[in-house]
C-alpha cells in the first residue's frame, strides 16, 4: 500500500516523518490555490482529510511536528470580527422534560390542544446533539450566510468558518429546494477527534477544551477560518428557518429532503406513535449513548405533521410541538484514593487519579486523568477528597471539582514528583514545544537509560533513517531487549561479537546459521556511519532528520559536534549562539541538546556507542561551485527519473535549498506531470520553470 494511504496507526516514526513532509507540501499548495488564487483544486472534504491525517500523525508523533506544519500555519485572510446576523425566523430553544411523567404530560397537552381523542400522534424522535446550533442560508441553492444562534434573534456571521465543515454543502444538491431556504442544525465534534486534539494540544502546550461542545464552539468562533478548517467539526441538519416556499408535509419528509440536498441527518432518528414508543426509544438511545461517538444530552420529540406544528405554535420562546427529554448528567461523586504517575514511552509524566469505583453514565470508573501538575494545582485535589467526576466525550473521565474542600483534617496539597520514578531518579524537566515554548507537561530526561523509554529509543535507533540495521527489525530488537541482551545502542554492536550469545541464537526457533550471519553482517555494515544519521539516531528531542543534517553540516565532524553539545550543556553562551546561527535551528533544539548532554548517563551511553563503532563520517558539505548552489528549488508533480527523496538529496548536495512551497524567494520550479497550483504560482511570479530532464541536464553539468 502506498505510504499516503496507510493507516496512521501503522506508520513507523520514519514513515510518519516522510508523510508529514508530503502533507505539509501538499496542503501548502492547496492553501495557496484556495486562499490566494481562489481556485481550489480539491474538494473541501478531501482537503479536510489531508489536514486530519496531518493532525492524526502529529498526535501520534508529537516530536515530529514540523516548523512549517499545516497545523501551525495561519493561512487565510483573517476576518476582523463577526458581523451580526438578524435571524428572520428566531432560533428558539426547547422545553425540557426531565422525567417520563413530563413526557406523558407533553403528549397529553398536544392531544388536548389539537382536540384529538384517542388517535395516535406520530412524532419524530431525534438524538439531541450536544453541540451548537447554526443557521445556513441558501439562496438559489448557494450557501450565502452561515450564522450562530446567538441570543436567538441575532447571531454571529461565521460563514467562512462554516464553509470549512465538510458536512455543509456549499451548493445544495438534487432538486426541489426553495429559492430561499435556511437549514438549521448542530455543529459538533466527534469524541475521538476531540480527545486526539486535546492530547496533541497537551503535549504541544496548546490550549485544551473541557468537552466536545466547548471545543466545537471555540473552533467555530475562530477569527481565522483556516484554524476552524483544521478542527474536526461535523454537522447534523434537523430544522429550518426562513423559506420562500413550503417543501415538506412532515418533519420526516423534511429530513429526507435535507439528505437529498447533501446534508447529513442523524441515522438514529425514529418516527414513532404513542408515549410508550417514545419512552422505549429514549431508553434504547440512552443505553447506546456511550458508543455513538459523539455527545448527546437527550432526545428531541417533534410532532411529525407540519400542519399540526403550525396549529400548535409557540409558547414564549419554545415550540409547543417539541420537547427535549434530557438524559441524567453523566456525573458522579467518589473518593480519590491516590495519585499515580504514569510514565509514557517518551518520558511523559501523566498523573492518574485512583478512585473508589463508581458508576458514571453506566460505566464503572476507577481511574481518571489529571492531565498534568497544573491541573492538580488548579483543582487543588488531595488524596482522601471526595471529587465530582464527569464522563464527557472522552472515554477517560475527568475530575471536575473537589466536593468537600473545607473538610477538617484534610491532607496537604499534592506535591508533584520532581524526579522520575525510574531507577535513575532523573530530575523532571518542563516539556517544550518544537517552537521552544514551555508547556505544562513534564518529562524524564533518562532517554536510553530510563527503562520506560529505552525500547522506544532503541527502535528509533535502528530505524531506516537512523542506523538502519538490516536483520534487526522491531520484533528482533524487542526479543533481545526482553532477554536483557540489548538495552543500549552499544549492546547491539557488542552482540555481533559475542560468540556465546550468537551460539544461543543459532539454537532458537526462526534463527539459523544464515540469519545469524546476516544479522552480524547487518550490524557490522553500520560500524561506519554518517554523522547526520548518528545524530538523528540518538533520539534527542526535536532533532528530526532535517535538523540532524543541519547540525552535521554545521559542525562538520563528530568531535566538533560533541564539543559544542557539551559546551551548551555547561551553559556556554557562545556555543549556544553558534548553534543558533545555523539555519532553522532554534531554542527548542538547543535546549534539547543541553538537556540531553547535561545528563551523565547519556554521555556514557554515547561514548560507549562511539567506542563500539569504527568511524563516524564527517558531513558532506554542500557545494558552492555548482549551477544551483544557493538557489531555492521546488519540486512539484510526478518525477519520473528519480524519487522525491533522491531529487532532494541531490539538490542539497549541490548546494541548493529545497522548499515545499513556491514563493517570491523560489528560484527554480521543477515541474513534472500533474503539477498543479505550484506550477501556476510559479508562472504568475515569473519563476524559472523546468522539466525534470532540463533539471537533470542542469545539475548533471555541475
Ligand atoms: S430542534 C425550535 N432538534 O437543542 C426548536 N434541536 O434546546 C429548534 N438540538 O438550540 C431546535 N439536537 O442547539 C432540535 N435534533 C435536534 C437537536 C436540537 C440538538 C439543540 C439545538 C437547540 C437546542 C434547543
Image (cartoon, rainbow, N blue to C red):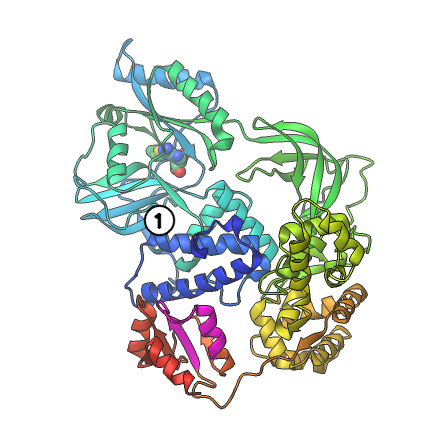
Residue 581 painted magenta: no
Image location (x, y in percent) of residue 354: 72, 36
Q: Is residue 204 above or below residue 683?
A: above
Q: Is residue 349 above or below residue 545?
A: above
Query: Considering depth in this image, is 509 or 163 the residue closer to the camera?
Result: 509
Residue most extreme to the front: 513
Q: Give ligand 1's quarter of the image.
A: top left
Which stretch appears magenta?
A: 632-651
Q: Is residue 617 left or right of residue 428?
A: left
Asked if residue 416 shows in the view, the reply is no
Residue marked by disc 1:
166
Q: Tell me what residue is drawn at x 67 percent, y 72 percent.
A: 528
Mark 1 surroundings: few (<14), some (14-19) or many (≥20) residues within 10 A: many
Verify whether residue 643 appears in magenta.
Answer: yes
Q: For this rendering, which residue is in front, 596 or 475?
A: 475
Quadrant location of residue 257? Answer: top left
Element assignment for label 1: loop
Kindly tell me whether residue 129 is visible in this rendering.
yes
For image coordinates 64% across by 56% down, the residue present is: 472
* Outermost top residue: 118
Amino acid at each position: 500500500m502506498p505510504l499516503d494511504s496507510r493507516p496512521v496507526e501503522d506508520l513507523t516514526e520514519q514513515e510518519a516523518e516522510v508523510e508529514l513532509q508530503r502533507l505539509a507540501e501538499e496542503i501548502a499548495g492547496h492553501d495557496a490555490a484556495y486562499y490566494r488564487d481562489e481556485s481550489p483544486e480539491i474538494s473541501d472534504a478531501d482537503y479536510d482529510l489531508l489536514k486530519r491525517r496531518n493532525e492524526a500523525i502529529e498526535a501520534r508523533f508529537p516530536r515530529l511536528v514540523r516548523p512549517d506544519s499545516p497545523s501551525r500555519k495561519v493561512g487565510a485572510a483573517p476576518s476582523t470580527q463577526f458581523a451580526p446576523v438578524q435571524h428572520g425566523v428566531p432560533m428558539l430553544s426547547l422545553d425540557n422534560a426531565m422525567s417520563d411523567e413530563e413526557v406523558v404530560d407533553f403528549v397529553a397537552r398536544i392531544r388536548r390542544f389539537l382536540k384529538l381523542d384517542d388517535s395516535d400522534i406520530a412524532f419524530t424522535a431525534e438524538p439531541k446533539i450536544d453541540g451548537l446550533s447554526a443557521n445556513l442560508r441558501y439562496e438559489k441553492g448557494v450557501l450565502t450566510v452561515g450564522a450562530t444562534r446567538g441570543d436567538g434573534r441575532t447571531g454571529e456571521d461565521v460563514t467562512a468558518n462554516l464553509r470549512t465543515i465538510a458536512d455543509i454543502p456549499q451548493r445544495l444538491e438534487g432538486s426541489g429546494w426553495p429559492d430561499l431556504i435556511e437549514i438549521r442544525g448542530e455543529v459538533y465534534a466527534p469524541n475521538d477527534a476531540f480527545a486526539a486534539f486535546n492530547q496533541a494540544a497537551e503535549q504541544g502546550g496548546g490550549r485544551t477544551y473541557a468537552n466536545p461542545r466547548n471545543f466545537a464552539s471555540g473552533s467555530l468562533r475562530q477569527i481565522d477560518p483556516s484554524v476552524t478548517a483544521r478542527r474536526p467539526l461535523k454537522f447534523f441538519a434537523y430544522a429550518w428557518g426562513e423559506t420562500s416556499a413550503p417543501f415538506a408535509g412532515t418533519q420526516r419528509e423534511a429530513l429526507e429532503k435535507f439528505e437529498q440536498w447533501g446534508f447529513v441527518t442523524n441515522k438514529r432518528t425514529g418516527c414513532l406513535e404513542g408515549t410508550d414508543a417514545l419512552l422505549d426509544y429514549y431508553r434504547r438511545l440512552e443505553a447506546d449513548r456511550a458508543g455513538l461517538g459523539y455527545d448527546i444530552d437527550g432526545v428531541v420529540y417533534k410532532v411529525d405533521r407540519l400542519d399540526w406544528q403550525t396549529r400548535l405554535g409557540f409558547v414564549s420562546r419554545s415550540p409547543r410541538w417539541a420537547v427535549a427529554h434530557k438524559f441524567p448528567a453523566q456525573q458522579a461523586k467518589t473518593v480519590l484514593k491516590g495519585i499515580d504517575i504514569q510514565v509514557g514511552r517518551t518520558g511523559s509524566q501523566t498523573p492518574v487519579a485512583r478512585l473508589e469505583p463508581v458508576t458514571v453514565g453506566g460505566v464503572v470508573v476507577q481511574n481518571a486523568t489529571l492531565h498534568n501538575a497544573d491541573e492538580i494545582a488548579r483543582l487543588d485535589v488531595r488524596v482522601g477528597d471526595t471529587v465530582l467526576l464527569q464522563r464527557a466525550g472522552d472515554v477517560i473521565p475527568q475530575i471536575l471539582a473537589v466536593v468537600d474542600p473545607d473538610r477538617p483534617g484534610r491532607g496537604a496539597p499534592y506535591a508533584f514528583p520532581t524526579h522520575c520514578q525510574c531507577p535513575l531518579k532523573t530530575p523532571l524537566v518542563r516539556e517544550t514545544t518544537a517552537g521552544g515554548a514551555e508547556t505544562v507537561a513534564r518529562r524524564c530526561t533518562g532517554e536510553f537509560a530510563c527503562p520506560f523509554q529505552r525500547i522506544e529509543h532503541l527502535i528509533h535507533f535502528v530505524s531506516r533513517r537512523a542506523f538502519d540495521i538490516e536483520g534487526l527489525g522491531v520484533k528482533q530488537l524487542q526479543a533481545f531487549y526482553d532477554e536483557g541482551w540489548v538495552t543500549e545502542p552499544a549492546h547491539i554492536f557488542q552482540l555481533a561479537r559475542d560468540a556465546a550469545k550468537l551460539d544461543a541464537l543459532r539454537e532458537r526457533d526462526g534463527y539459523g546459521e544464515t540469519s545469524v550471519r546476516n544479522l552480524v553482517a547487518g550490524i557490522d555494515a553500520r560500524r561506519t556511519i554518517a554523522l547526520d544519521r548518528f545524530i538523528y539516531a540518538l533520539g534527542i528531542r526535536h532533532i528530526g532528520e532535517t535538523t540532524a543534517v543541519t547540525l552535521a553540516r554545521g559542525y562538520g565532524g563528530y568531535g566538533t559536534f560533541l564539543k559544542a553539545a557539551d559546551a551548551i550543556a555547561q551553559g556556554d553562551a557562545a556555543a549556544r549562539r553558534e548553534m543558533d546561527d545555523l539555519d532553522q535551528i532554534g531554542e527548542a533544539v538547543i535546549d534539547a541538546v543541553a538537556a540531553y548532554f547535561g545528563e551523565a548517563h547519556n554521555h556514557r551511553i554515547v561514548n560507549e556507542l562511539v567506542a563500539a563503532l569504527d568511524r563516524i563520517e564527517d558531513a558532506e558539505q554542500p557545494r558552492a561551485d555548482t549551477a544551483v548552489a544557493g538557489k531555492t528549488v521546488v519540486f512539484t508533480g510526478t518525477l519520473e527519473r528519480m524519487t522525491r527523496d533522491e531529487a532532494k538529496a541531490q539538490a542539497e548536495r549541490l548546494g541548493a535549498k529545497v522548499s515545499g512551497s513556491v514563493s517570491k524567494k523560489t528560484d527554480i520550479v521543477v515541474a513534472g506531470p500533474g503539477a498543479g497550483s505550484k506550477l501556476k504560482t510559479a508562472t504568475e511570479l515569473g519563476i524559472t520553470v523546468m522539466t525534470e530532464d532540463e533539471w537533470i541536464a542542469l545539475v548533471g553539468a555541475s
